[in-house]
């Protein structure tokens, strides 16, 4: 039988409805659609999709089980390599990873691996999550700093290996960016909480409201634990560095999304965290963070939500699905446009942004064509709120506070492929080592570091 060339469509909320609520946009496949989609998999011998997965999930194996209706077996295969499948099935950039390697791309669309992963994770959550066998206690103690995807993955894997794991998290909730950054309509908080609950059930203790580097130092932790994993992420906002960035109404994407997500400003008046939106919002940048800001502002009542980006659509770093969703919801894209200054009133309140048109020149060191200002093309847009989403740098607290720890040029902790730093008992991974990247890369780093920590602990016996 000929293989269907397109993925089975994902059912989702209509744009006109979803911009009025924060409920998740896609509904997920039902069992019948999941089986039909799984049957598109060719089960290739060379398994190119597995090579594209940073956590090495046995993709064709779990898909085969779905195709045969053996969902429990499929979940078991999936969970041997990932502890966060409901998260990855929603936010992973599959198009550049597993799906980007799928043989079906030669004739049409790849197998919808991400949607199948999400289907299985949701199926398991409804049926009740099984806890795998935990190895006998090794008597070794490991501390994980930061409960984002890197730290949680490392903690879960180490706990399964029989080590005693304690996670110290600065905030009052776990998940890192999954909780404070990615909005509810893309990744419901209940789903993150359920996956964190699974990690806790594996035996990892999570302690909240501990800022390592302030509440307790890494040196003090070295005295109490046999090894340390640092997964503190990249939460330091980058700014445009143009005049007027201090006006009331200009937010970093981080502050804006944290207020909305973690501090629950989106549930006003039930929660009274202040957030100012106004009628016209301009988001600067074109990555996933920018799309999240622009789409969130529409849901908070903005009449116009702009994305302003200095390059063209081709160079936008956001996932295709995020760009498509933003367009469907009415976000207005002003491309080849760069802000020059913010303009405020005499009370310091933001009123306008002055921009300049750009054109693309020769490729720069990133391989993308360099944007060049077009002389005399300045123009102004009246705005109430500006959201700066042009990137984040590694959190500086730990890199700055640990004596002798080797730090890279971008303020990142330097590690080898397995997460080893220059201090033997200290390991690191995720955005704190790579700079802002993706959930699955952070998880992959956490996984490799867990193996390296296990090896290190065994070598100390
Ligand atoms: P984080 O998720 O940042 O977690 C670090 C944790 O460490 C946090 O909980 C923090 O509170 C804690 N911490 C920091 N300092 C300390 C300290 N001193 N002591 C104790 N705890 C500390 N990636 C995708 O793959 N797909 C997407 O769709 C996507 N969308 C995104 C949208 C937004 C808005 C943002 C900001 C990022 C997005 N990303 C996306 C990127 C992805 O979320 C990150 O790459 C990933 O979360 C990095 O994981 P991490 O564990 O390294 O760090």
Image (cartoon, rainbow, N blue to C red):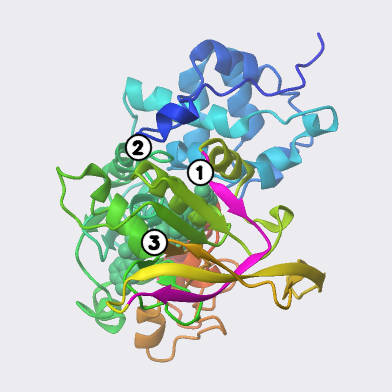
Residue drawn at point x = 27 percent, y = 45 percent: 266
Q: Are marks 3 and 1 in contact (CB under 8 Å)?
A: no
Residue drawn at point x = 24 percent, y = 72 percent: 211
Q: Give left or right: position of 301 versus 29.
A: left
Q: Which residue is mark 3?
A: 385
Quadrant in the rendering for residue 125? top left
Quadrant in the rendering for residue 416? bottom right
SS of the residue at dot 1? Answer: helix
The question of residue 152 being in magenta is answered with no
Confirm or reject: label 1 Cβ below 8 Å from ligand 1: yes
Q: Earlier in the sequence, mark 3 or mark 1?
A: 1
Magenta segment's dominant SS is strand
Measured in 3D between alpha carbons, the distance from the residue under mark 2 to the one under mark 1, in whole angstroms, is 16 Å
Q: Give left or right: position of 106 versus 254.
A: right
Say few, some or many: other residues with alpha carbon within 10 Å of mark 2 (under 14 / 14 to 19 / 20 or more).
some
Q: Are marks 2 and 3 in contact (CB under 8 Å)?
A: no
Residue drawn at point x = 47 percent, y = 82 percent: 243
In the picture, the disc for residue 22 is 2
Residue 353 spot, x, y in % from top left: 49, 69
Work out whether 149 lies above or below 321. below
In the picture, the disc for residue 91 is 1
Magenta residues, start to end: 330-345
Q: Foreground mark, 2 or 3? A: 3
Residue 249 vs residue 366, the one in the foreground: 249
Residue 397 spot, x, y in % from top left: 35, 80
Measured in 3D between alpha carbons, the distance from the residue under mark 2 to the one under mark 3, in whole angstroms, is 20 Å
């Amino acid at each position: 039988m000929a293989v269907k060339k397109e993925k089975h469509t994902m059912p989702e909320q209509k744009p006109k409805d979803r911009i009025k609520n924060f409920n998740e946009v896609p509904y997920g496949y039902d069992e019948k659609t999941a089986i039909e989609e799984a049957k598109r998999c060719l089960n290739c011998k060379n398994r190119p999709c597995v090579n594209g997965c940073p956590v090495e999930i046995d993709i064709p194996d779990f898909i085969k089980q779905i195709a045969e209706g053996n969902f429990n077996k499929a979940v078991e295969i999936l969970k041997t390599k990932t502890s966060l499948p409901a998260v990855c099935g929603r936010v992973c950039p599959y198009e550049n990873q597993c799906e980007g390697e799928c043989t079906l791309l030669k004739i049409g669309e790849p197998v919808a691996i991400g949607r199948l992963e999400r289907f299985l994770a949701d199926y398991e959550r409804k049926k009740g999550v099984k806890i795998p066998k935990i190895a006998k206690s090794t008597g070794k103690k490991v501390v994980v700093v930061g409960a984002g995807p890197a730290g949680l993955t490392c903690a879960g894997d180490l706990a399964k290996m029989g080590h005693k794991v304690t996670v110290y998290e600065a905030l009052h909730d776990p998940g890192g960016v999954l909780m404070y950054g990615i909005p509810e309509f893309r990744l419901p908080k209940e789903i993150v909480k359920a996956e964190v609950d699974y990690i806790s059930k594996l035996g990892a203790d999570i302690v909240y409201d501990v800022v390592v580097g302030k509440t307790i130092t890494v040196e003090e932790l070295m005295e109490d634990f046999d090894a340390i994993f640092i997964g503190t992420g990249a939460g330091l906002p980058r700014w445009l560095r143009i005049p007027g960035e201090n006006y009331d109404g200009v937010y970093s994407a981080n502050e804006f999304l944290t207020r909305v997500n973690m501090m629950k400003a989106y549930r006003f008046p039930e929660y009274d965290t202040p957030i100012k939106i106004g009628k016209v919002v301009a988001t600067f940048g074109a990555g996933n963070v920018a799309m999240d800001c622009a789409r969130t502002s529409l849901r908070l009542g903005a009449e116009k939500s702009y994305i302003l980006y200095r390059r063209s659509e081709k160079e936008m770093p956001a996932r295709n699905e995020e760009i498509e969703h933003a367009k469907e919801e009415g976000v207005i894209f002003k491309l080849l446009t760069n802000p020059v200054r913010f303009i405020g009133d005499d009370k310091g309140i933001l009123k306008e942004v002055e921009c300049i048109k750009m054109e693309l020149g020769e490729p720069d060191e990133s391989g993308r064509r360099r944007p060049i200002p077009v002389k005399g093309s300045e123009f102004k847009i009246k705005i109430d709120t500006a959201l700066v989403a042009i990137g984040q740098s590694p959190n500086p607290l730990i890199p700055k506070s640990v004596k002798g720890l080797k730090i890279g040029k971008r303020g990142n902790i330097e590690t080898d492929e397995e997460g080893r730093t220059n201090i033997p008992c200290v390991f690191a991974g995720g955005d704190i080592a790579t700079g802002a990247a993706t959930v699955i890369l952070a998880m992959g780093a956490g996984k490799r570091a867990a193996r390296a920590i296990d090896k290190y602990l065994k070598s100390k016996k």
